[in-house]
Amino acid sequence: MTRTNRATEIEQRLQAPLAAVLSPRRTITAAAEHLAARPDHELDIVIHRAISLANTNAELGYQFVQHAIEALDAMRLADVLAWAEQAVELYDQDGLFAATSFLERPERFADEVLNRANAASFDDTCGMLSIYINGLAGRRLALDIAEHAFTDTETIFLPRRISRFEDSKLNRQLYKATASFLWAQAWYGTFRLDANHRTLEQRLAAYDNPRNARDLFDALETIRINACVARDLPGLYRDWQRLQTLTGPVDYPTHWSGIIARLQRPQASMETTFELLPEVINDEVPLALCYQGVLMPGQVAQTMALRMEKDKAALQTSLAEIARNAVPSVASEDTQQPIDTEALRFEVRVTAKPDAPGEFDIQLSLGGQALGIPPELEALLQSILQDLGGFPTEYLVPAGDNDYDPQAIAAEIDADSESGLGPATYYPEWDHQRHQYRKDWCALREQEVEPDPAPFVNETLKKYHGELHHLRKAFEALRGENQLKKRQPDGDDIDFDAVVQAMTDLSLGLEMPPQLFTQLHRHERNIAVMFMVDMSGSTKGWVNDAERESLVLLCQALEILGDRYAIYGFSGMTRKRCELYRIKTFEEPYSKLVEHRITGIKAQDYTRMGVTIRHLSKLLNEIDARTKLLITLSDGKPDDFDGYRGDYGIEDTRQALIEAKRQGIHSFCITIDDEARDYLPHMYGAVNYTIIDDVRKLPVKVADIYRRLTL
Amino acid sequence: MSQAHTLPVDEYRITEEPYYRPLGKEIEIFLAAHKNRLPILLKGPTGCGKTRFMEHMAWRLQLPLITVACHDDLTAADLVGRYLITSGETVWIDGPLARAVRSGAICYLDEVVEARKDTTVVIHPLADDRRVLPIEKNGELLRAPDSFCLAISYNPGYQSVLKDLKTSTRQRFVAIEFEYPQPELECEIVSAESGIAPDTAEKLVRFAGMTRNLKDSGLEEGASTRLLVHAAKLMASGIEPAEACRSAIAESLTDDPEMLEAVNELSASLF
Ligand SMILES: Nc1ncnc2c1ncn2[C@@H]1O[C@H](COP(=O)(O)OP(=O)(O)O)[C@@H](O)[C@H]1O
Ligand SMILES: [Mg+2]
């Protein structure tokens, strides 16, 4: 029986019990189709349960059927039945609405009731998995949650949780198996266009029953892909098999044996699968493997169409650039002259890498001259190759000046919205969900704080007169001097006093002491510190005053120490307008102007911390100092207008701090946010922050914290 | 004070040919630079064969090879030399650099940017056409014989801007760029170094490629040829491949638990 037939049968069996709530616009056709892929014994139990629920109330039965497939994906069969039972109890106690809302969210039940120990969740697995998948090969794939596992060739979609097995380790492995299988579909060319650029969807549409054809194609492709992976990644294949053995074997019709053998040959491709499809088109669709996911040719076609458009334009643009650089005379000197088209002809040669299965060497040449391929272009060429299996000639035509160039247009639009802001420096941002940087995502501009001649600094110095006295003393004690250590066992120079003494000892028949050298100990405080001051809107009022006072006292202390320091304020609105306000640069001496800028610090907009940290780390790195510190004064967690909040902002900030650490910068955060205890340890590490609960204490504390940090 | 003592350099002679598989024209370039008394800069990530290359070249040129691993406490005196006092006499002892100059050997300063800035300055007069080493402490001016060769190495990948090689230093050297070898060559090297079968070596090299794919996903550096050789040697001694990759490669690349699990899964998938 084909899967479509099974689906029809399911629909028929449920028709009568659910009749009261069904209508032409309210059917169970889609649900029945999904259920048809499940094994017989599960299916029978589900249908039985649906009928018994429907006997209580037809709507209950209907909702159960609609959500049964999600439930089956998220839980073991026994738990699915418990879920149905609880729905009936709710119905009895709280009525239909309570019960149907409950049935609409099977994943909640899975979350709450299910033994958490045995399920694996997307959230817990995706970090590791996305690294794993990106390590394998090919185009970068993102991971995301969907009801069913499938890929559109850019994202691998996986269920929110998997609890098919009793053991959570096995469920985690099933995540890996499913994700890697979907990766393999993309990598081994399941979705590659044919010679006439037809998509998989279009080719399947040529069959009488495209759905059935798709399922059979899927079954055959799965056999082929299993064979590819068994060859190239035998360890992974063993994991797949282990899971499948636990789930139960899949039987293929006997006349498939020759077909299977052909699909397993190394030279088999997705074209082989298509050649063989007519031979099985009337057979029943075998059960799906436990890690197989579903095939969504429609989604793939959409994604590919968009990408190919983009890739083609991007390739043409970079070829145009290469051409310009390679043939400068053509572009600059004499535009009247017809361009030698032969000299501008690009060619691509693709050769399989003998030792890396599925991978290809791409060589690019212009007018017969081989060209070096920069990494970004290489990725682009590989992406096109993965979709098309080659390079159509129209792809190799460099973009002309008048041609449609989406990149240039996009750049112009961007420039428009930022016009008048001056040139920006672009920084990446870390997207923790995709486990990947967004390139050139934030536009950052430096500007100066408007100086304010109000007598704020003097007032502050008066206000903290007593504290300042102590501060100064404490900091003077820190000031180091060079010291020549004498009588060392080893050193740069000879300690002549010691030698003279030693000679005397020797002449007296005493043993000569080995401490005859001098060593220069540099107690030099080789420190550069960058202060990064929150100027977001939330600091308005008390916090802003406290920050400014802190800076006044800090400058006093730092001038005593002679440490090099810079002060920048940060704020901004969206990724396109990240702003940094210069208060004092490293080169600039402390002056009246600096004092006026400190006075002029005002609360502005939002807090986008990652980009700020990246930029300030760069500045800090240009300074030659043994110890480098980045100290943040802030009143809250990272937050910006365009989605830079919650985990996203925290993770990007954390990533920026990790980058800084790799460059040898020590980061420290001083904050006045009560809730900071929740996220600061994650962002800065447990010892690299301080929370000050009383704003009024901030000014004195900041200087003291700095002293302790650099003891 | 007495005359200078120079320790013999014969112990630095390499008598057996060190295995080195050329990746490009580096041997020819080195020989030509040496012939013209030009100093040499080896650029490239750690573990890609720079040290081995130097050993090989020293053997080829039949010159002693004196290697100094630079670190941030390395002083000029550590390189040039200092006085020692033995049995009532002060004796000047050459540092490795002075020894190499005096004896016309090859001096290889590994990871030179790790050394303090004032230290790198002492090599400047050796690196231009003066080819001299002034020893301030005892007033000597050493002239390098023709066979003397100064080579330094530097990894442009992971050093901070601060540790970047100064242009004034860099511009004195003939630069030879090293990369991880192409897959076929890397297989050849790994199996030659460890004795494991070529098809196993090939899998290791593919694994290295996977870790090198992860540079944008949070791994600082991918597996180097050196780490592959280590894993291969463990395997040749009977350690299971996945275990060997874990101990010799994954654990030395990262401490991050997620990254570690993913990297271990990658190697387990291959074998
Ligand atoms: N081209 C090569 N020929 C032979 N062995 C190599 C080559 N490249 C790397 N190796 C192997 O890798 C190891 C590490 O190389 P090494 O020279 O120590 O790296 P580096 O000095 O660049 O950090 C060597 O011991 C050797 O086993
Ligand atoms: Mg080395």
Image: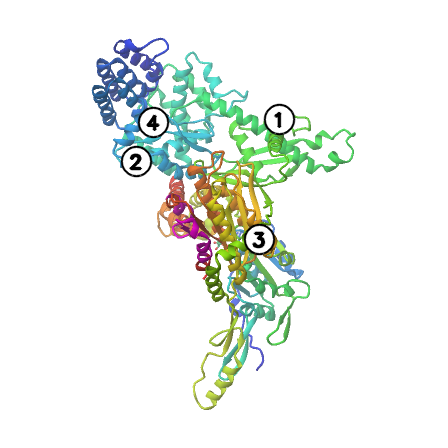
User: Sequence order check: which comes first, mark 1 or mark 3?
Assistant: 1
Q: Main secondary structure of the magenta part?
A: helix
Region rendered in magenta: A678-705
Hey, which quadrant is residue B129 in on the image?
A: bottom right
Residue position marked by numbered label 4 in the rendering: A289
- Report in which chain the residue with disc 2 lies: A
Cα–Cα span, label 1 and label 3? 64 Å
In this picture, residue B129 sits left or right of residue A639? right
Residue position marked by numbered label 3 in the rendering: A595
Cα–Cα span, label 2 and label 3? 63 Å
Identify residue type, mark 2. Leu
Q: Are marks 2 and 4 on the same chain?
A: yes
Identify residue type, mark 1. Thr
Give the answer, above or below, for where A108 lies relative to A49: below
Disc 4 element:
loop
In this picture, residue A384 sits left or right of residue A11? right
Residue position marked by numbered label 2 in the rendering: A170
The residue most toward the bottom is: A508
User: Sequence order check: which comes first, mark 2 or mark 4?
Assistant: 2
